[in-house]
Amino acid sequence: MTEVHDHGHEQHHPTPPSPIERRVAALEELLTEKGLVPEGFIEEVNRIYENDIGPMNGAKVVARAWVDPEYKARLLQDGTAAVAELGFGGPEGNIVAVANEPSLHNVVVCTLCSCYPWSILGLPPTWYKDAPYRARMVREPRVLLREMGCVVPDDADIRVWDSSAEVRYLVVPERPADTEGLPEEELAARVTRDSMIGVGRL
Amino acid sequence: MNTDLLDTDGVAAAPRRNGELVFEAPWQSRVFGLCAAIVETCFEGDREPFRRQLIAAIAAEPDRPYWDSWTVALEQLLLASDLIDELSIERRIGSPEDPPA
């Protein structure tokens, strides 16, 4: 995916590390020397928390909606309750699910800050918080989506949902045509984080 | 790999801004990953010993920033389990010609 970057955004800190930074670095060094921190483990943990664990909850919700029309109806009616049926959710406001259709593509942004359905999608991707994403997704969603590798057919409308502290949105992507007969678990594995934000299509 | 390191509610819940998990500086995600590694390599994936330390560290200084308490909790866990000793930590911090990576 093309990341949305504000050029000049990267900052270098010439200031010396704070006491806590030095402490953590010392712990990391000592534990690494003792062989207790496998190489690349820390990066892997952070990557997994960002990409896999959280999004899997949302993916299960989407997969259930694909196989169970009644669940999908409940999900679109009351997202918070339907997500809670599967044991997910948190104290982070209401979840509203919006479903893609052949003629409608939904995408989520938080123009004010970076509200995100953490309990079902995990850590937000870094670009989600970037000012250019937040501004351009409202101003020129079709262009930005294309830049991010998400091509929405010209005859489909794009609806942009603005998250808030009270309401978090979950995009229910369309079920891919080649998934007939797949078990729910395999369906969930097909659902990507980006598709549930609306910056990807399946 | 332990996939359940973070409490989502209760006293030991990770900080969230508008519901979102917050790492405000790289060291915070480092110490988070470091803890995950120790839970995995030294405690067979059982996060309870760490969680108890975290709750104790937060209770000891409720106003301390969350990831600072997390760091204290990890250090206490390491000390209590004889995985590391205080002196070597202080020595490592105190050697400016060998700055932390």
Image (cartoon, coloured by chain):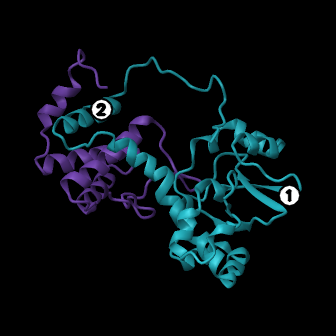
In this rendering, is residue A167 above or below A110?
below
Task: Name the foreground residue: A84 vs B65.
Answer: A84
Residue A66, image x, y percentages: 65, 75
Answer yes or no: are tags 2 and 1 on the same subunit.
yes
Please give the letter of the chain rendered in cyan: A
Name the image quarter holding the N terminus of chain B: bottom left
Residue A197, image x, y percentages: 66, 55
A131 with respect to B2 (left or right): right
Q: Secondary structure at mark 2?
A: helix
Q: Residue at x 63, y 37 (%)?
A: A3
Task: Name the foreground residue: A123 vs A114.
Answer: A123
Q: Earlier in the sequence, mark 2 or mark 1?
A: 2
Q: Amino acid at mark 2?
A: Ala
What distance separates the C-alpha of mark 2 from that of mark 1?
A: 50 Å
Task: Name the foreground residue: B10 vs A133.
Answer: A133
Q: Are marks 2 and 1 in contact (CB under 8 Å)?
A: no
Where is mark 1, residue-wise? A156
Residue A13, labelled with which disc? none
Q: Residue at x 26, y 60 (%)?
A: B45
Instruction: Give neighbour class at mark 2: few <14, some 14-19, many 20+ (Cα, 10 Å).
Output: many
Please give the letter of the chain rendered in purple: B
Where is mark 2, residue-wise? A25
Residue B55, image x, y percentages: 31, 58
Residue A65, image x, y percentages: 64, 75
In this rendering, is residue A125 above or below B25?
below
Please state which of the two labelled residues, at mark 2 or mark 1, is closer to the viewer. 1
Name the image quarter holding the C terminus of chain B: top left
Location of residue A80 (image quadrant): bottom right
Instruction: Give neighbour class at mark 1: few <14, some 14-19, many 20+ (Cα, 10 Å).
Output: few
Q: Amino acid at mark 1?
A: Ala
- Check the image and name the residue furthest to the top: B97
Q: Chain of mark 2?
A: A
